[in-house]
Image (tube, rainbow, N blue to C red):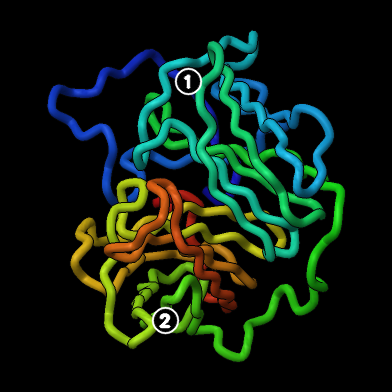
Amino acid sequence: MLAALPCVVTGHQPVPPGAPKDPLCGFARNGHYLEAASVTDGLAVDMVAVGPVRINEPVTLRFFVKVKPGDIAVNDLQVEHEKLMHVIGVRDDLREFFHIHPVKVAPGTWEATHVFTRGGTYKLWAEVGFLDGSYSFGQPELSVTGDLGEAATNAATNSDRPDYEQRGGYQITFKHTEPLLSGRTTSLQFLIRDAAGREIPTENFLGASMHMVIVKDNLAVCLHAHPVDVGFADPVISFSQIFAKPGNYKLFAQFRPKGCNLPPDDAILAEFRVEVMAGYSVPVDAVGK
């Protein structure tokens, strides 16, 4: 999911009887990343914003799922992590993040209503499962009119405690077991505690114990990752990750602590910045899982 891969739509491939429709950890099929504006042949997802896009006002984001050329509507998307479409959005300074799930409103057409609370330039990725793989389509940047919020300074540096966050009454500690070098598989681990310091496991959030989105500071990389362990009892949540390119990244980790009273699709968001040093060269498809 780090560079454009060929997009080839083949004939229908039925799922074998008894095969799981929704893997608990990671995407079950091959990953493909494409910039939507560059797709001329095969599966495509294009987005338009309906009406003006201003802060604190609902805006409809409309997605067209189709096969090019011919703009043939696609209706048989496959469930991945309990949803037929995931949309990830970040502001270009990585200080704003959202994860929403459009619903089908017409053949090949999906919509979601979103309220931006901060102005600026945003990048969105639409993720779908179809036939042979999991696809992430980067959308053209979207300009949101209105107040930017706090000054966007030091956007590519770590805070004083890059390994620790407090969110929603919980303490989240982050560590990696090896130095962060491009091309090396690294274990990224998260531990969640309550306000009293007790270790807290998580409960199901969209078919996983945690969802993590990894975005490079130049918006050239967006990877939607899932833990290596499908269970929910262990308070330590681990990801096995390869960074194909060196640079500065931000990790957006979403989770639901066990026993929380959040609405069904809501989660707590913890954010961590990391710097990946130059290491080894790896093929793009080595990081797609």
Camera-near label (1 vs 2) is 2
Along the viewing direction, whichever of 167 and 248 lies nearer the viewer: 167
Where is residue 179 drawn, in percent x and y? 45, 83
Seen from this angle, which residue lies furthest left? 18
Name the kind of residue labelled 1 in the image.
Val
Nearest the eye: 269 or 218:
269
- Pointer 1: what residue? 9
Mark 1 and mark 2: span between their CA atoms? Answer: 42 Å
Disc 1 is placed on an element classified as: loop
Q: Callout 2: helix, strand or loop?
A: strand
Figure check: 151 above or below 15: below
Q: Residue at x 51, y 21 (%)?
A: 104
For disc 2, the marked residue is: 173
Q: Position of residue 209 (x, y in %)?
A: 31, 59
User: Which numbered disc, 1 or 2, marks the residue that appears first in the sequence?
Assistant: 1
The spot of residue 288 in percent (x, y) is 44, 50
What's the residue at 73%, 73% (across, down)? Answer: 155
| Depicted 206 relative to depicted 44: above or below | below
